């Protein structure tokens, strides 16, 4: 009689598959897997999964909600992981997120810069920042991310903040568009941004359904959840 797979076996299998697909996509576009950081998105999954991921060599995890992110980190502080906050952020929660996150990928307005900086200052720990760019047409409902034309002013605010370090850009592909076309537009926005800010080399793009297209367009960070951890419980 065979024993059922453990949760560790399940995660290891998902991870193996995604790592192979990352390497394949990277080599197709003349890059290597080392050029791409895998951020495993653990939202809705328990801290025990975070621990298993760390044991399987994962260094970066992503969470999109406060306080879930902070609670999970509190149970996982001994693992030495880099915690990415990737979700929409209310200004009144930004200071506390800035006090525990290592990377905040969803910075899309100046108000957040000031609040995150206060939190980072409190903890006396610098926070890496990505500016989230909207790839939706202006006026789209529920649009998250800054207009490409507003990035320069946002970057200035980050530079002037003291405790925040500008690393690059992040985006989510629109649902109703071919992801590769959206990521190519993002790559163009990133290229002109990097021309002004040579230090802003990170490009976070791609999720379970489109990370290969994102790598083809130059993503340095992919944010993958369900392809590794399975389907999330439905939104509460
Ligand atoms: C949930 C989430 C992801 C991961 O989504 P999957 O489809 O599960 O890979 C990536 N990025 C952001 C911003 C998310 O909120």
Image: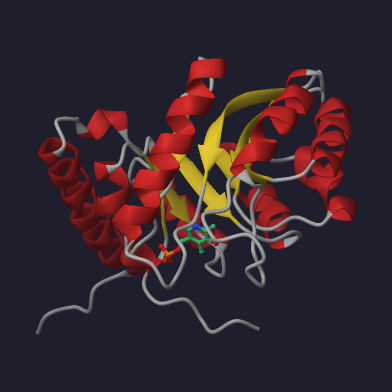
Instruction: Place residue 141 in its image quadrant.
Output: bottom right
Q: Is residue 80 visible?
A: no
Q: Is residue 38 left or right of residue 68?
A: left
Q: Is residue 141 left or right of residue 178?
A: right
Q: How many marks?
A: 0
Location of residue 158 with respect to 89 vertically, above or below: above
Name the residue located 81 percent from the left edge and 37 percent from the top edge. Answer: 116
Name the residue located 81 percent from the left edge and 43 percent from the top edge. Answer: 112
Q: Is residue 207 visible?
A: yes
Location of residue 17 with respect to 188 vertically, above or below: below
**Could you tell me which quadrant the N terminus lies in?**
bottom left
Q: Is residue 202 left or right of residue 65?
A: left
Name the residue located 54 percent from the left edge and 60 percent from the top edge. Answer: 136
Location of residue 85 with respect to 99 vertically, above or below: below
Location of residue 3 with respect to 143 vertically, above or below: below
Return the x and y of residue 104 as percentages of the image width and height: 65, 41
Instruction: Place residue 138 in its image quadrant.
Output: bottom right
């Amino acid at each position: 009689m065979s024993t059922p797979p453990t949760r560790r076996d399940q995660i290891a299998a998902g991870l193996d598959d995604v790592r192979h697909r990352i390497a394949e996509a990277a080599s197709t576009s003349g890059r290597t897997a080392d050029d791409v950081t895998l951020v495993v998105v653990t939202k809705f999954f328990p801290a025990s999964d975070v621990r298993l991921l760390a044991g399987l060599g994962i260094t970066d995890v992503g969470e999109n909600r406060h306080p879930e992110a902070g609670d999970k980190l509190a149970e996982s502080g001994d693992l030495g992981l880099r915690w990415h906050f990737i979700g929409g952020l209310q200004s009144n929660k930004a200071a506390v997120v800035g006090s525990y996150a290592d990377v905040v990928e969803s910075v899309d307005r100046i108000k957040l810069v000031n609040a995150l900086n206060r939190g980072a200052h409190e903890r006396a720990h610098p926070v890496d920042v990505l500016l989230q760019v909207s790839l939706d047409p202006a006026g789209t409902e529920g649009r998250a991310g800054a207009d490409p034309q507003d990035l320069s002013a946002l970057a200035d605010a980050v530079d002037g903040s003291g405790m925040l370090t500008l690393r690059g850009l992040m985006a989510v592909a629109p649902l109703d568009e071919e992801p590769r076309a959206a990521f190519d537009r993002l790559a163009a926005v990133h290229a002109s941004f990097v021309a002004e800010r040579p230090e802003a080399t990170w490009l976070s793009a791609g999720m379970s359904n489109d990370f290969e297209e994102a790598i083809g367009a130059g993503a340095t960070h992919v944010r993958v959840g369900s392809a590794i951890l399975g389907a999330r419980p439905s939104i509460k």
